[in-house]
Amino acid sequence: MSTLKGDPALTARALAPITSRRRNRLTGSGTTPWLFLIIPLAFLIVLTYIPVGNMFWYSLTSWDGLDPEKEFVGFGNFVQIFTQPEIFQVFFVSLYYLAGAVAQLVLALYFATLLSFKTRFRNLFKGVIFFPYLINGVAIGLVFLYFFRPGGTLDALLAAVGIHDPGQWLGDPSLVNISLAGTSVWRYMGLNFVLFLGAIQSVPAEQYEAADLDGANSWHKFRFIILPSIRRILGLSFILAIAGALSAFEMPYIMTGGANGSETFVIQTVNTAFKFSKVGLASAMAVVLLIIVLVITAVQRRVFPDERGDES
Amino acid sequence: MTIRPSLGVAATAAIAALLLSGCAGGAANDDGEPAGTITVLTNRTDLVDTTFKDYAAEFTKKYPGTEVKFEALTDYEGDAKIRLNSRDYGDVLLIPSSNVTKDKYADYFEPMGSTEELSEKYRFTNEGSFDGTAYGVSTFGSAMGYVFNKDVWTKAGITTPPATEEEYLDALEKIKATGSIPYYTNYKDGWPLATIEGNLGTVQGDTVRTQMIEDDAPWTEGNDQYNIDGLLFDTVAAGLSEPDPTTTNWEESKNLLASGEVSSMILGSWAVSQMQDAAEAAGESRDVIGFWPMPWKTDTGFTSVTASDKFLAISKYSKNKATAKAWVDWFTNESGYAASQGAISPVVSDPAPDTLKDFQELGVNYIELAADPVGKEAVINDIANEAEIDLFGNIYRQKLIDVARGAADGDKESVFADLNDRWAAARATVDAK
């Protein structure tokens, strides 16, 4: 041990591989990150980009999903989409989900702000609000089917407070979309809530203290400290909410299957592809939805840019 | 009891001789004595560990040295379709008919003989055949009609089956007066609603599919399609179905029928034993469930369309075809599977099941749909898909119910006119292809 410690030649030899390794790393810096990325990139390309590429190709054919021959029809499918009003009519249903999404964001923000301050049973409420997001969508669908059925939980609850015969929550075509959008709000609000709460809690406590000294009330703190601090996450949630409203699928598909005027654009696309074997037309509908979401995102980012002077 | 097995052996020998004539011998056991292990694919996840185990034991007793293994697939149609792309899909399997068109049968399945010869012994041979050769033998069949709660119908004073749509609707009105929901649509689950299409052929006869692909307006009075959907529309429009169709539940509907809260549903006779089970579980007698033919009586009496459930077939790539064939014969002729399901046996000489007792007393005529003309098997589906009318599904029927109950705009005339327009336009497109 002692000889090893004292001998400069040995020390140098021991260090040699380390320095050479360091040199290697410096010279190979261009390829190493890519080596690490190969697997995730391969998954991304194989499972996302190639299927999307295929979808663009199918959208130009009249493929039925099984036929080995895919007949090229050019933009025929797109012409059909834009000339058949009933295909676009279903976007009207998305308005319900859009209204629901706005309500969802407002509620999530309200609860996040409330629970980021000292409140009694704070952690319990956090759990209660986030919990629905953890439940499987099919389970929620079944629970809410019982909740909304005539004489079900909701009707029993209303009867207890003296409201009888409130109408059919899923059977009445003027109520069904409100009921379904409400279920979606209940399910997804927890996620927005947690995102907002995380962002609010990253605001340094000194800012509130300083605000207190300046005589700010709660509203002022919310308006001038919290809101600017969570601007980015708010913008992101907004884009996700709009995209989610346009492509609403899971809740209505499980609960009504799109019956009784609750058909959304994605349900219609799925039915077109798999019930009526028009994969080509359905792919074109999916492409149209993708373009609409991209356009809305672009507009939203132009109108509400999230880069501000205070950020880097 | 002593006669049955010997008859079975004779039948097996006869069928085997018939089947083996076309086979070339190889290394595999194509035409020897049944021996060794075979794998059988089945959709009955509920029976595979109980009833089917017993069947396998009985089969081994009859053919010592054989062993039958089962593989139960939950999503039978989907999984079997994928496995057909390999050569590994068991020795005996059920034809996944929703995914494999008849013209492909010869690529996957062993021929069982000519349709003509087989039809002397077995029912439903048309459905399992292509171009005069049979590839599948029916597991069991069922007849169309409606299940009803006898207690409620008797209480309402209806003891003979209504012969016309008018009488039928009158009967439902009388039942409504007793406080029971006369008819249950199964709107939410959809597939029981779709089974009413099985009545196709009741009035137009066994070539109805061929007639429909030649017809620009199937939803015209006097046609089966008009009768089927019209009856549904009128029932719902008169308020004779459940008040909120969007929250129906199939499993629950069995209990509702057993208890008399609901008193009828149009289904196949396969449903009768399930309803009887529900009645028994609810502490009622099994006799409370009745099954009557559709109210479209003609000069020749009531008619009921019969159709087969899945078809048993032998894999073309089986290494043990001799045993596979022996299993198919044994399962069809001797297992008693069809009888245990309360269904129509695939064997012509077998007696009618108890579930169809009323049908026998009424002298109901059974019809089987004729085979589609060669090359036209897919036309009816092509037209339906092009028109986006899911004839064998539930989407357009749900819309029809929505109109009938006043939840969507339109009336019976406008709905049927729209369906006819779309059908005619789709026919023109499909013909042009």
Image: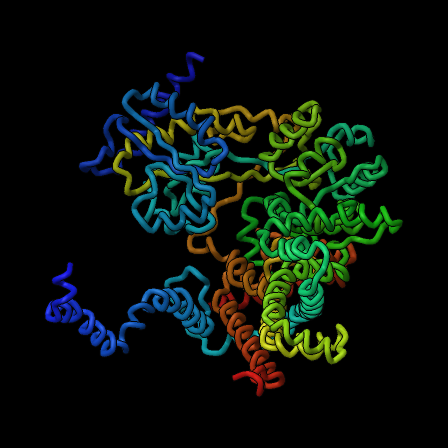
Left or right, B92 with reference to B122: left
Name the residue: 61% across, 49% down: A139
Most foreground residue, A243 or B260: A243
Name the residue: 27% across, 34% down: B320
Please determine whether, in this image, residue B313 is positioned above or below residue B415: above
Of all residues shown, which one is farthest toward the bottom?
Answer: A309
Of all residues shown, which one is farthest toward the top?
Answer: B2
Q: How many marks?
A: 0
Name the residue: 52% across, 56% down: B380
Q: Residue A57 in the image: x percent, y percent? A: 42, 73
Q: Is residue B398 visible?
A: no
Q: Residue B119 in the image: x percent, y percent? A: 43, 35
Give the image quarter of residue B395. bottom right
Please determine whether, in this image, residue A29 is positioned above or below residue B79: below
Most foreground residue, A166 or B210: A166
Q: Residue B390 in the image: x percent, y percent? A: 58, 56
Left or right, A35 with reference to B170: left
Give the image quarter of residue B152. top right
